[in-house]
Image: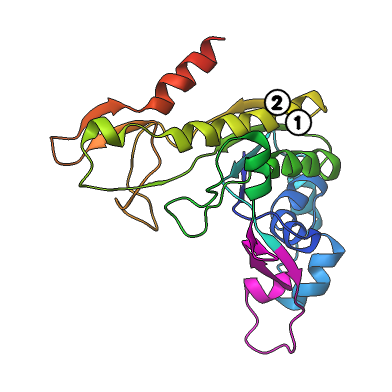
Amino acid sequence: MILLGVRSFGATATLGHDSTWFAHPITFGDYPQSLKAAVKERLPRFTEAQSQLLKGSIDFLSINYYTSNYAENAPSANGVNVTYFTDRATTLTTEKNGVSIGTAVHILLSLCVLTQTALSWLFIYPKGLRELLLYVKKNYNDPEVYITENGMADANNSSLPVKEAIKDSLRLRYHYGHLSYLSQAIREGVKVKGYYVWSFQDDFEWDAGFTARFGLTYIDYKDNLKRHLKYSAYWFKSFLLK
């Protein structure tokens, strides 16, 4: 299994750099020429034996999708202080012409005008999931795919009573939107075999600690970690039973 972790989906250059680093070798046995040209001698070289072991070696591709960004071409001015980010040769942003990404989509679907979540990098753009899946289908030999992470964060507001904190209507709409576009991708031929919500319950996030809540289940940190199903959990249960 290989995880294709995606926080951003913008210009082809950005997605190509992020995905080819992992998905290209396990599909075709080597890095693409574009990545070799960008990274040059800093990119490891596979032996012929390694290449043959890698080529077509996965049973399925796992994708983590949370959000999308706009990307703009930004070639590095020089070869000094090169990093993973300068190799991308793009800059990422969440706005275009003063409008946050996803706003038009949410107005159209009557989901929610607010597109940013409790985390500064996580804007709601469900259409990006379909775009990513179609990209993978086209460029990586149409693999079987599992969505291993998909979710959004609420702020951990300790002043809210539990009965109010579990009313996570934005999360419900987040998953409704993403599952709608996931269904569309399946109808277009993408071999999606599974979908996993991030996350089943509130957790300790590696870059946000307990300040953000991703769960379908509310964890009461002030009352012996008691569990309370959020509105989104009841909705998701109903969805799965259909």
Q: Check whether the beta carbons of the residues at disc 1 and disc 2 lie within 8 A of each other.
A: yes
Q: Nearer the viewer, residue 84 or 46?
A: 84
Distance in Å between CA atoms under marks 1 and 2: 5 Å
Indicate the secondary structure of the residue bearing disc 1. helix
Residue 149, can we see it?
Answer: yes
Q: Quadrant of the N terminus?
A: top right
Query: How many residues crowd around disc 1 within 10 Å: few (fewer than 14), some, or many (20 or more)?
Result: many
Q: Quadrant of the C terminus?
A: top right
- Horizontal and vertical percent position of residue 158: 21, 47
Say if the magenta span includes residue 65.
no
Which residue ends up furthest to the top in the rendered image?
242
- Horizontal and vertical percent position of residue 30: 80, 56
- Name the residue rendered at 61%, 33% in the picture: 177
- Horizontal and vertical percent position of residue 105: 68, 43
| Residue on which disc 1 sits | 185
Say if the magenta span includes residue 85.
yes
- Please say if 76 is above or below 177: below
- Please say if 240 is above or below 194: above
Query: How many residues crowd around disc 2 within 10 Å: few (fewer than 14), some, or many (20 or more)?
Result: some
The image's mark for residue 200 is none
Amino acid marked by disc 1: Ala
Residue 126, can we see it?
Answer: no
Indicate the secondary structure of the residue bearing disc 2. helix
- Name the residue rendered at 41%, 19% in the picture: 234
Give the extent of the magenta segment.
71-100
- Name the residue rendered at 42%, 52% in the picture: 118
Left or right: residue 227 versus residue 30 is: left
- Please say if 4 is above or below 239: below
- Name the residue rendered at 82%, 27% in the picture: 189
| Residue on which disc 2 sits | 183
Amino acid marked by disc 2: Ser
- Please say if 176 is above or below 53: above
